[in-house]
């Protein structure tokens, strides 16, 4: 490591603090939803928006945050983001009604969208001349976020039992303060030479993604024949077409379309979307399965998800070792195949399935994802120059968040209607997901054979 660079572990731990709190708040809220509903006499639709306001804001603003990271410097944007997230967490913890909670959840999403691309850009630039250290740093950074999202239901259950639902937000404050003050000593990223900011492009993108996700969320309540649903989907498609046109002509696009000229970049983005598309939707449905089919309590459900934490922890650390030894292709292939095997084993989920029959999929899904994602992230950043690492990170995380948010809505609709419908949905999803991931593994094997320079 260069003498003028901050220590390896200091950089990893500081940037990981942001990823940990942002990912923790994706899943920790689910356990507290019943208590929040009682506190505010909120209906199901309102509770959905409390959960999803965060994800939507996260996804729609991350592209802009990635470009701003490259333009202004990643350290400055990291500090702004973690302060916003901390202030929003205070607001969530002190919210006096459901509307204010939804608003502060959206503000949390804005903070996360700002923190994540800038934190990954800091990692990438600090170790840009040392590929092995860079791969290892990304593996540890990914592990922190993956473990936190898997541990969210367990931590949420413990905190809610100890106090009230408000503590799940207030616990973020010391983490945010630590991240802000430690980041003062970080090395800043290489700034892009590009000047300007595409405000029309950001607004169009925000409309396209927000309206589409909102239509997916309300699909179950209003039905596909509702003018609001098909009108919203049609409008979002029109906005997406306008967005692509805008990015082609903008002088400083928030999404440089030339990124997609790289076949390898497209493969990595597709893999990230696929893993999130399947994993987050399955975890949502499995939570329904454990509580409504096997009749677990919320806390028992959280404990049942503990293998996810172990799977992510072991696999993320293993991914760093595999990348050091074999490059990125081997861990991506191993992760994709194990992930597909976990999906196949979910076919064991029936109305009276013993929990131990589900141990492999509960461990194998996060294990496969955890092995593949650090290598996928390393490969994505390797396809761009140092000055574009922020936008590359933003594209990767935006597509992953959007895929996960949409699929929770789709899989949730498939699983609505009672015990048999939930079991049937898991069966159908498991088969489709396993076949798809095996196909993608073959695509990866063929496409990534030329990636020896990423070793």
Image (cartoon, rainbow, N blue to C red):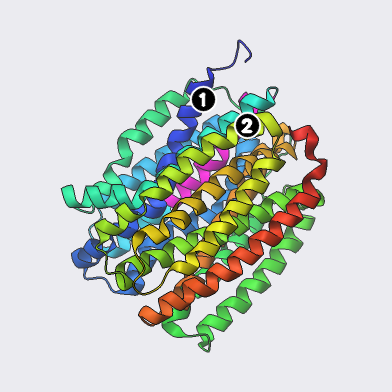
- Label whose residue precedes the other's in the sequence (2 or 1): 1
Quarter in which the C terminus is drawn: top right
Left or right of 153? Residue 137 is right
Quarter in which the N terminus is drawn: top right
Q: Is residue 179 visible?
A: yes
Label for residue 11?
1
Instruction: From the viewer's side, name the closer residue of 173 and 135.
Output: 135
Q: Say whether residue 120 is magenta.
A: yes
Badge 2: how crowded within 10 Å, few (<14), some, or many (20+)?
many
Instruction: From the viewer's side, name the closer residue of 93 and 428.
Output: 428
Q: Is residue 163 visible?
A: no
Q: Residue at x 39, y 66 (%)?
A: 49
Name above or below for residue 256 compared with residue 86. below
Left or right of 170? Residue 102 is right
Q: Are marks 2 and 1 in contact (CB under 8 Å)?
A: no
Q: Residue at x 36, y 41 (%)?
A: 86
Residues in magenta, as a range: 108-128
Instruction: From the viewer's side, name the closer residue of 322 and 152.
Output: 322
Instruction: List the single residue furthest toward the top.
Output: 3
Q: Residue at x 39, y 82 (%)?
A: 417
- The residue that label 2 is drawn on is 135
Secondary structure mainly formed by the magenta segment? helix
Q: Say whether residue 113 is magenta.
A: yes
SS at circle 2: helix
């Amino acid at each position: 490591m260069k003498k003028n660079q901050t220590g390896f572990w200091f950089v990893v731990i500081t940037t990981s603090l942001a990823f940990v709190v942002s990912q923790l708040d994706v899943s920790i809220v689910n356990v507290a939803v019943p208590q929040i509903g009682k506190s505010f006499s909120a209906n199901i639709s309102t509770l959905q928006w409390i959960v999803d306001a965060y994800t939507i804001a996260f996804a729609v603003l991350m592209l802009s945050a990635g470009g701003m990271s490259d333009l202004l410097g990643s350290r400055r944007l990291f500090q702004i983001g973690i302060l916003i997230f901390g202030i929003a967490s205070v607001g969530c913890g002190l919210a006096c009604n459901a509307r204010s909670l939804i608003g502060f959840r959206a503000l949390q999403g804005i903070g996360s969208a700002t923190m994540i691309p800038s934190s990954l850009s800091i990692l990438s630039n600090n170790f840009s001349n040392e590929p092995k250290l860079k791969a290892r740093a990304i593996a540890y950074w990914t592990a922190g976020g993956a473990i936190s999202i898997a541990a969210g239901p367990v931590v949420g259950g413990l905190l809610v039992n100890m106090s009230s639902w408000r503590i799940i937000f207030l616990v973020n404050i010391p983490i945010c303060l630590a991240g802000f003050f430690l980041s003062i000593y970080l090395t800043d990223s290489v700034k892009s030479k590009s000047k300007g900011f595409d405000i029309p492009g950001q607004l169009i993108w925000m409309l396209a993604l927000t309206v589409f996700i909102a239509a997916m969320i309300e699909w179950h309540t209003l039905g596909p024949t509702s003018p609001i649903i098909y009108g919203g989907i049609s409008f979002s498609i029109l906005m997406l077409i306008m967005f692509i046109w805008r990015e082609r002509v903008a002088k400083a696009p928030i999404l440089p379309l030339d990124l997609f000229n790289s076949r390898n970049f497209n493969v990595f983005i597709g893999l990230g979307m696929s893993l999130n598309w399947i994993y987050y939707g399955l975890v949502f449905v499995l939570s329904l399965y454990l509580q409504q089919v096997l009749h677990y309590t919320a806390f028992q459900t959280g404990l049942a998800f503990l293998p996810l934490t172990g799977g992510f922890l072991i696999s993320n650390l293993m991914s760093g070792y595999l990348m050091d030894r074999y490059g990125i292709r081997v861990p991506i292939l191993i992760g994709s195949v194990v992930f597909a095997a976990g999906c196949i084993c979910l076919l064991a989920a029936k109305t009276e399935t013993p929990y131990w029959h589900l141990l492999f999929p509960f461990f194998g899904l996060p294990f496969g994802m955890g092995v593949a994602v650090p290598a996928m992230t390393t490969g994505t950043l390797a396809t761009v120059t140092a000055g574009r690492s922020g936008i590359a990170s933003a594209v990767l995380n935006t597509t992953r968040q959007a895929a996960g948010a949409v699929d929770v809505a789709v899989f949730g609709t498939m699983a609505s209607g009672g015990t048999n419908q939930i079991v049937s949905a898991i069966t159908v999803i498991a088969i489709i997901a396993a076949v798809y991931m095996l196909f993608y593994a073959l695509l990866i094997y063929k496409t990534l054979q030329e990636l020896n320079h990423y070793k």
